[in-house]
Structure formats: C-alpha cells, structure tokens
Image (tube, rainbow, N blue to C red):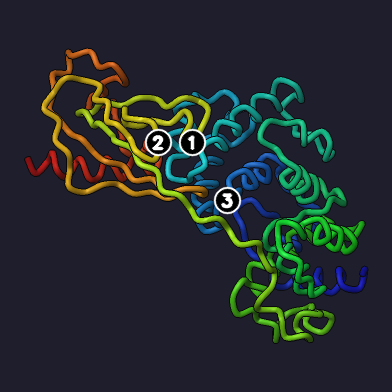
Amino acid sequence: MRDLSAVLLDWYDVHARQMPWRVGPADRKAGVRPDPYAVWMSEIMLQQTTVAAVRDYHRKFMSIWPTVADLAAAEDADVMAAWAGLGYYARARNLLKCARTVVADHGGRFPDAYDDLLKLPGVGPYTAAAVAAIAFDRPETVVDGNVERVMARLYDIHDPLPGSKGILTEKARALTPPKRPGDYAQAVMDLGATICTPRSPACGICPWRDPCAARVAGTAAELPRKTPKKKTPTRHCSRSDGAWLLETRPESGLLGGMLGWPGSDWGDDPTPAPPLDADWVRLDAEARHTFTHFHLRLTIMTARVDMQARPTAGRFLSQADFSPAALPTAMRKVFDLAHVTLRDD
C-alpha cells in the first residue's frame, strides 16, 4: 500500500495541477503552508461545481475578503451578489455562517482536527476531511467523485454507487499515507481529473497502470458503475416582472436569500398570481433552467405599472439600485428575455 502511495506522490511532484488555493509540492517541501481559509473556501465552492468554474470566483472572493474576519464582517447581500452564477446558493449562506462561527468561537482560526471542523456550519464529512488533510496535513481520507472512480478501477469493483461508497472509502483509507497526506489527497484527485477520467482513461501514462485491476480486466472504461437515476421531473412557474419588481427569496430552499421575481410556487401546474393589477402580457419565450433534481420552466409575464403602486409581493428597485449580475442564473435568464422584449417595445 505504501509503495502505491509513494509512486503516486512521485507522479504528483511532477504533474500537480496549479490552483489559486493550492500550495504546490515544491513549495510545501520548502516549508510553505496552505492558508486554511483559502482551502476551506475552495472546498465549499467546489461542491457540485467544476474547478474551471471556481477559479475566478475564488480569486474574486479572496481579493474582496482576504481573511476569514473580512468575510465574517461582510454584508450578506454583497456576498450573495458576488456568488451569483455559481449556483447552489445555500453554500453562500453557509459560507457566511461558517466564517462568523470561526471568528466568534475560534478566534478567527480554523480548527485543525476533523471532528472540530465537522461542527462548523456547512462543513460535511468530505469537506472536514479535505480541509484537515490539505490545510493541516492530517492523515484523513478524502473521497470525492474522482477518488471513487480511481478506487473502483484500481480494485475492479463493480458494485454500483452509491451503495459501494463504503468499500471504496475503505480502499482509499488503506492507501492514505501518514506522511504528506495532504499532497496525497490532492494527488489522487488530480489523477482522477487528468488521467483516470470518466471517459477514455489514459491508462498508458497512469502511474498506477501496472497494479490497476480494471486495466488488466479490460473494464476500466465502464467503472464505476452507478445505480440508474430516476427520471428528472419538470416543474413550472409563472414569473411576473416589473421594471424592476423583485423580491428576496426565503432563506430556506433553492436560491434561498437571493434576488428573484415575484411569482407562483414551483410545481407541476402553476396558477399565476400577479402581484399587481395590470395588463399583463405573456412572453412567447419561457426561461428554462435545470437543477439537480428537476427541470424548471419559467413562464414570464410583463407589464408597465406605476412604481407608486403597492405590490402584494416584492419591491421596486430603480435602475440605479439594480444590477442583473446580482441575480442567480435562473432569474438572470428571465431578466434577459424580459429586458429584450421591453426594450424593443
């Protein structure tokens, strides 16, 4: 097991990906330590999001709020606006809650132990293990989708996910070395992201080519197996767009705490509930957006109304106070469609 880990670390020393939040192997050997705040932020952002999408957001957040104390003192609306477009907005709310907890309860320093990290808002088992290993070099087992794929192929495990998660984690734990566990955790993830990829794995240049059981068996490309997903349902919603009539969505639920357009609940058969008496016009186009568990189709209603009117939902924002960039992606799609129509009128 240690030989496998050593081989992978030798590969990582040469081929490690460069990340804004990562301290490379050469710098780590020279004594440079990772910033736990930067590592934690990257792990929160990377939940359900690709590295390519996260790079610029991470740089932006670190430039605006360079320390956890800066983030803890930030206005909620500013953080949510900066997060717009990254998706899964509960992460942004937890980002603030966690930063404020670290400042209030830990003197502005992230705890270095897995159990203590796990108690922080928005930090689950994977994130706690990743921060403990990468930021503090704790010998924790870090298992993401890349690691699951690598383990399934290395040991030719055909039991489908998510049921096989336990055995894959045990295999990963057995390989985690006591020395350089942070570099090792990143090495396995890099291996999965660059060589042991979901499709067409580059087995010929893999550092674990010889011991890989799936390569020998010729089954690497079909692993890991996954339990078939249920059909993704489609939900509908009617959106009423003022110039500009917006609401802050409830803290709980999808797009919680974000700006949006007043409208009906998201369901199978929505009934429009206009927030004002007006001559509402339905646009021919509808905004479509896909979440993890369902497709959303937004019917858009527009009207020109007196801004002195009192809507039953939402509030008017002047052009000077409203920035489309503050909208989450689904709501931005509505804006783009409605804006073009009203401008042409």
Please name the amino acid that badge 1 sits on. Leu
- Disc 1 versus disc 2: distance between alpha carbons? 10 Å
- Quarter occupied by residue 186: bottom right
Q: Is residue 254 above or below residue 250?
A: below
Residue at left 75%, top 62%? Answer: 25
Write down the residue under mark 2: 266
From what the image shows, is residue 16 above or below residue 302? below
Q: Amino acid at mark 2?
A: Trp
Q: Which residue position is annotated with label 1?
A: 254
Residue at (29%, 19%) from the top-left corner?
315
Q: Earlier in the sequence, mark 2 or mark 3?
A: 3
Q: Nearer the viewer, residue 301 or 61?
A: 301
Residue 126 seen in the figure? yes
Quadrant holding the N terminus: bottom right
Which quadrant holds residue 264? Answer: top left
Q: Nearer the viewer, mark 1 or mark 2?
A: 2
Residue 51 lies, in percent from the top left, at 56, 57
- Give the percent coordinates (x, y) of residue 290: 43, 50
Query: Badge 1 local density, few (<14 within 10 Å), some, or many (20+)?
Result: some
Quarter the C terminus occupies: top left
Residue 243 or residue 98, whichever sits in front: 243
Mark 1 and 2 residues: CB-CB less than 8 Å, in contact? yes
| Residue at x-position 16% and y-position 20% | 277
* Labelled disc at residue 172: none
Q: Which residue is mark 3?
A: 48
The single residue placed furthest to the left in the displayed view is 345
**Left or right for 334, reference 35:** left
* Helix, strand or loop at mark 2: loop
